[in-house]
Image (cartoon, rainbow, N blue to C red):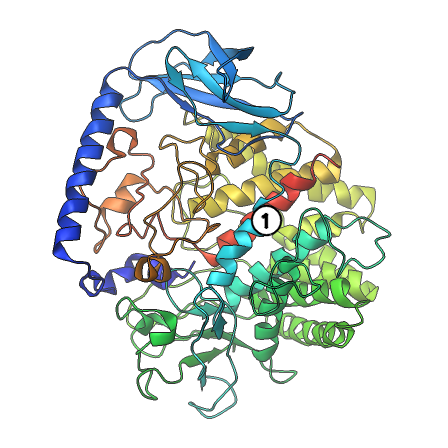
Amino acid sequence: MAPLISTPQRETIDMSTFTRPLAKWWLAGCVVWVFGWSMAARADEGEVHLRASQLGYRVGEPKIAVAFARDGFDGPFRVVEADSDKVVLEAESEFLPDATWARFTRHVEIDFSALRRPGRYRLAVGESRSVPFIVADDVFAPLPDTLLEFMRQQRCGYNPWLDAECHQHDGRTAYGPEPSGTHVDARGGWHDAGDLLKYLLTSSNATAQLLLAWQLQQQPGDADASTSETNLFADRVDSLGKPQPNGTPDLLDEAQWGIEWMLRLHPAPDQLYHQVADDRDHSGWRLPQDDPVDYGWGKGGARVAYYADGRPQGLKSYQSESTGVANLAGRYAAAMALAYQVWKDDDRRHLLARQCLQAGIEVYRLGRAKEGVQQGNSHGAPYRYEETTWADDMEWGAAELYRATNDRSYLEDARRYARLAGAESWMGRAETKHYQYYPFMNLGHFRLYDLVDASTQATLAGYYREGIERCVRAGRGNPYRIGVPFIWCSNNLVVALVTQCRCYEQMTGDKQYAAFAAGQRDWVLGRNPWGYTMLTGIGQRSPQDVHLMTTQLSKRPVRGGLVDGPVYERIFQNLRGVSIREPDPLAPFQDPRAVYHDDVGDYSTNEPTMDGTAAAILMFAFESTASSR
């Protein structure tokens, strides 16, 4: 997510530029007020609230829901058929002592893991019912393709969701070997979040995770893994995202969109650009094709393209704390080497595959020469992506380059960077800087694991286990056992935690964290105080009024965007420029530990992000292939 929209800098947006007829605002306010009062009243009447995954569960996995109320309540808890209300199982429950959330003083866990018959069900206690959910081994299979709908909606250059071209003049250089203002072709890529900026920092990670999601579900011996139709990834759109098949699974079309932009940012063997536009972007609500912002080359003209030189940057008041380029270089190399692995035997893309491998090798060398981090840049405010880690990225890049080339020097590099990265992470911390420990999990350990000896494997698995254990301990502080700090992009952290658990399980065969991981995943799917999934258009109660210009102005919903997620109440209260319509319909469920609002004005919790969505695609690829493993 773009820090320039999703941190306090977003206060520079003038919400008054997002206009609606006064009568509609008044009517909506009345409806929301009545709905909010009604929900608060119901919550005070002793209703038992049931929170489970709104999508469902695999047949053989742990199935644990949460029930809560203001006062004591009695079971028995039942699993009933969604349509007939016929009881199919009496569920076990466990009272959670000293577990409170907001005004709710009694919480219980409901364990219905014994339900192993596929079907459509609800949880029931007394007159209370959960939303329906599915039990089936393929319950998560549709999600990766569905989440791609949001990725296509974020495309820059040509946007298929809007059927419009945008930002055709990107960009003109700042820093680097060329005179300032020199044209460089930086068209394409993805808009980062609710804004229109583009970052290699996040896009490289998104592209690599999409390609890894493809690799994950390919079985050894597939005749043509780059073009074969699979159960998990369908072919419904062409390379431009238009609704017509083109013989390529949509996941790979989307990954190629990212790859082609990344190649443009590397116009020469020793050159790399890392960011297009800055917080001058925040000039009001508009569709991408109508962007009027002037970066010095006329309204709606070229936008600045920042060169990755490994030094502090900032064209106005504020400077980044950059120290190198290895964070970008490692992720770039990982994405390019993965692209080579996927497309090297594809008759239509083998030349692209070779170009990707060469670019990955060249940019990896830049990272070796300038170890350190290239942070994001701001212009009129001090808020930016403040990444401080880079060894994890170089490990991932080296591991993928070894897989692509069989050059043992990359394997030795990967071992060295793995030791440097260790278990360093946000995991177990209550606070971090914005995107400080990015990506939010180290996929390098996972991709290196099967390339090394047993002793090194044990070390790599230990790094993962250490981080997971920290999160298990942190989760004991809330009734949902959620092990992440509720800082900006908490949902991204949840997705990363689930993925790390699944990587660990696949590496070692140790399933001790299976139930913990399922609970974290189910938090995103509705097992949370607010009873919302955290993905737009997914589930019966999902974010609708999100902080996204395209949907707000077009009045069209888009499915599959992972929203930022809950934050500490104090974060929300200390932000200027945040506005929600009162009274809050979710007020009974807000707690100082975390608040969430399905409201366009709450950019801290309800803005969907491109890189978070790509990470969720990888997570659901793990979830969808778990049964076959």
- Residue appearing at x 68%, y 68% in the figure: 336
The reply, left or right, for residue 277 in relation to residue 353 is left
Q: Nearer the viewer, residue 63 or 337?
A: 63
* Residue 329 visible at all: no
State the quadrant of the N terminus.
bottom left
For residue 197, which quarter of the picture?
bottom left
Looking at the picture, how far across and down is residue 226, in whole percent? 75, 61
Looking at the picture, how far across and down is residue 216, in whole percent? 71, 49
Q: Secondary structure at mark 1?
A: helix
The reply, left or right, for residue 219 in relation to residue 385 is right
Within-10-Å neighbours for mark 1: few <14, some 14–19, many 20+: many
- Residue appearing at x 73%, y 60% in the figure: 400
State the quadrant of the C terminus.
top right
Looking at the picture, how far across and down is residue 409, in whole percent? 79, 65
* Residue 301 visible at all: yes
For residue 594, which quarter of the picture?
top left
Q: Is residue 368 above or below residue 385?
A: below
Which residue bears the numbered disc 1?
A: 144
Q: Is residue 289 above or below residue 243?
A: below
Give the mark count.
Answer: 1
- Residue appearing at x 56%, y 78% in the figure: 265
Q: Nearer the viewer, residue 413 or 295?
A: 295
Q: Is residue 327 above or below residue 606?
A: below
For residue 245, which quarter of the picture?
bottom right
Q: Nearer the viewer, residue 270 or 262?
A: 262
Amino acid type, label 1? Pro
Looking at the picture, how far across and down is residue 206, in whole percent? 56, 59
Q: Is residue 175 above or below residue 140?
A: below
The reply, left or right, for residue 302 in relation to residue 141 is left
